[in-house]
Image (cartoon, grey):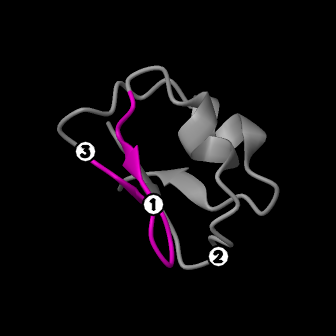
Amino acid sequence: MAYKITDACIACGACQAECPVDCISDGDIYQINPDQCIDCGSCAGVCPVGAPVPED
């Protein structure tokens, strides 16, 4: 199951820098490419606002 980034994102870049497969793109809020995400949770572990969450 891939992760997704919720509207809580503050676009700080912490998750993008931590992603081992470079599947996070920046913008007003960051987005995770679900086809590339390996469900490692690294992004969630570094996010200061808890924006990355597992997809339902």
Mark 2: amino acid: Ala
Rendered position, 54 above or below 12 = above
Q: Residue 36 in the image: x percent, y percent?
A: 24, 32
Magenta span: chief secondary structure:
loop
Q: Is residue 51 magenta?
A: no
Q: Residue 28 in the image: x percent, y percent?
A: 50, 79
Of badges 1 and 2, the one in the foreground is 1
Reading the image, the residue beneath label 3 is 34
Quarter of the image for the C terminus: give it: bottom left
Q: Secondary structure at mark 1?
A: loop
Highlighted magenta segment, given as a residue range? 22-33
Q: Residues within 10 Å of mark 3 (few under 14, many from 20)?
A: some
Q: Quadrant of residue 52?
A: bottom right
Reading the image, the residue beneath label 1 is 26
Mark 3: amino acid: Pro
Q: Residue 6 in the image: x percent, y percent?
A: 52, 70
Q: Circles 3 and 1: CB distance less than 8 Å?
A: no
Q: Secondary structure at mark 2?
A: loop
| Camera-nearest residue between 7 and 11 | 11
| Structural distance between the alpha carbons of marks 2 and 3 | 18 Å
**Which numbered disc covers residue 3?**
none
Quarter of the image for the N terminus: give it: top left
